[in-house]
Amino acid sequence: MKVLIIGLESILISFLIFRVYKLSKSYRKLGKEKSFIEKMEVILSESLPKPVAMMITREITMLYYLFSRDSNQEMNNAFSYHKKVGYKGIMIVLLSVILLESVGLFFLLHNWSPIISWIHVALNIYAVLYLISDYRAIVQLPILLKDNMLLIRIGSRRHIAIPLTQIASIDGGGKFLEEKRNKHVFKGVLLEFDTPQFEIDLKNPIIMTNLLGKPQEITKVYLTVDDKEKLHQSLKEYKFPS
């Protein structure tokens, strides 16, 4: 029996080493063109059901951006989108509220149920780590215009790649508030109560993967960046119709 258990353990360890090797090889093959999030989605989707792959990707991504220092901010056609909306200040306020609420509720809940009070603390620690990771991803993943593609990444939340040849028109984002719940709209914004700078209509639907791992058709994109004029001028160089 002991020999059988050792044999099964050896097979399992060998299988895990092989899977890690294959995943590592697939990751390296993707090169530097894709972000860490996109790479993880691709390689995990090869081995796991899409919803499971997306869920694991989100958790790994959270840990990755807590410590990562990679950034595309220095590229010529990189456009940040968090500075003018004051997202750093909003993050500080949110984190302060969570920390204060955690301390107050911990003592209140501890008198009633110590277990629940510690569960509450654990959930709040997770929320703090997620917010910090998301902010770092926002800073490190600017919107990119390169290789005839518009790459829109909103932190670790969502991303889409738009071939420039698929852009039908570019207008102001005045219709956003009435259209933001439309499932065919991609929200390239951090704050949904602000009016975006751009409304980008597409010639044909672009398929993206939503947070549940399901395909979603996108026909329109709303977008806000810190340097509106620079992005507008860069897009005009491709002579898109207005």
Image: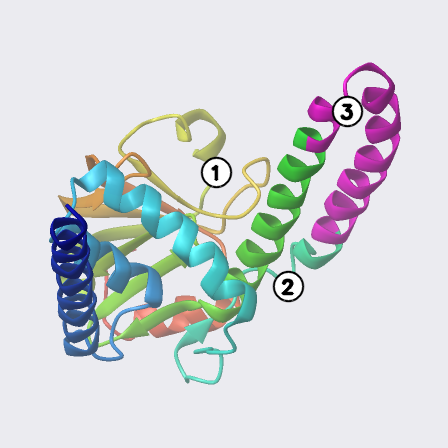
Instruction: Name the amino acid, label 3.
Output: Pro
Question: Could you tell me which residue is drawn at 12 percent across and 56 percent down?
Answer: 7
Badge 3 element = helix
Q: In the rendered image of this protein, does residue 133 appear above or below residue 204?
A: below
Q: Is residue 20 visible?
A: yes
Task: Give the foreground label among 2 and 1.
Answer: 2
User: Residue 66's spot in the image, x, y percent?
Assistant: 55, 64
| CA gap, disc 2 and disc 3 | 41 Å
As for residue 240 lying within the magenta part, the answer is no
User: Residue 37's spot in the image, x, y percent?
Assistant: 33, 60
User: Residue 56's spot in the image, x, y percent?
Assistant: 33, 47
Q: Which residue is mark 1?
A: 174
Q: Main secondary structure of the magenta part?
A: helix
Q: In the rendered image of this protein, does residue 52 appear above or below residue 61?
A: above
Q: Is residue 67 left or right of residue 60?
A: right
How crowded is the residue under tag 1: few (<14 C-alpha within 10 Å), some, or many (20+)?
some
How crowded is the residue under tag 2: few (<14 C-alpha within 10 Å), some, or many (20+)?
few
**Hey, which quadrant is residue 25 in on the image?**
bottom left
Q: Which numbered disc covers residue 114?
A: 3
User: Magenta residues, as a range?
Assistant: 90-118
How crowded is the residue under tag 3: few (<14 C-alpha within 10 Å), some, or many (20+)?
some
Work out whether mark 2 precedes mark 3 in sequence or the reverse, and give the earlier one. 2
Q: Which residue is mark 2?
A: 83
Work out whether mark 2 precedes mark 1 in sequence or the reverse, and give the earlier one. 2
Work out whether mark 1 precedes mark 3 in sequence or the reverse, and give the earlier one. 3
Badge 1 element = loop
Instruction: Name the amino acid, label 1.
Output: Gly
Q: In the rendered image of this protein, does residue 184 appear above or below residue 74?
A: above
Instruction: Name the amino acid, label 2.
Output: Lys
State yes or no: discs 2 and 1 in contact (Cβ < 8 Å): no
Q: How many marks?
A: 3
| CA gap, disc 2 and disc 1 | 21 Å
